[in-house]
Amino acid sequence: MRKVMLPVGCALALFAGIWSLDGGSPPDVDPVISGSIPQIDAPAGDRFLSVTNVEAETACAVSRGEKLTNRSMRLTAARGCEQVWPGLSHVATWTENGDGTVVLSNATGDAVLTLAEGDGMAYEAIDPPNAVITLNAAD
């Protein structure tokens, strides 16, 4: 009888262990740690900025990427940036002038917006003068 009970007991213990595994529920996630992990599809070094048109109450995101020259970086605008400012969805470069101003240009080199450094990691549009646009770090 003992020879039968030992395998039956082991089988029950194994069955109970397998039964207790819950493969259907998602694992618990710590939002603080998970939020600090960069997105997989984002190239390393990209900096995300939120562009806001204060008057029109619209916003979109742009991504400042790899260096193109010692003063300029690639800039990519998300969909919907055309509603924030005309031509903003076609920006291609972020050029730092060395005097605290930055020019956002399209692929042909035409300036779409000229920005000046504001508080912290914020920029404010200075040209064209009627643009009430701000850029803030989004990451």
Image (cartoon, rainbow, N blue to C red):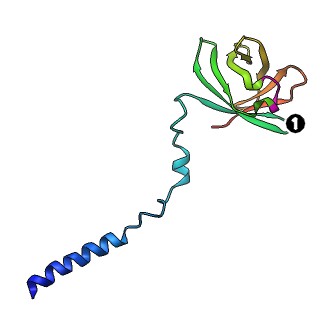
Q: Residue at x 41, y 67 (%)?
A: 22
Q: Is residue 1 above or below residue 41?
A: below
Q: Which residue is mark 1?
A: 56
* Magenta-span inclusion, residue 85: yes
> In the figure, is residue 2 to the left or right of 128?
left
Percent coordinates x, y for residue 118 in the rendering: 77, 28
- Could you tell me residue 62's position as x and y percent? 68, 30
The amino acid marked with disc number 1 is Ala
> Which residue is more in the foreground, 67 or 12?
12
Taking the magenta stretch, the answer to whether it contains residue 38 is no
On-image quarter of the N terminus: bottom left
Magenta-colored span: 83-87
Residue at image position (79%, 19%) is: 112
Badge 1 marks a residue whose secondary structure is loop
Q: Residue at x 67, y 37 (%)?
A: 138
Q: Quadrant of residue 11?
A: bottom left
Q: Is residue 136 above or below residue 116?
A: below
Overall secondary structure of the magenta section: loop
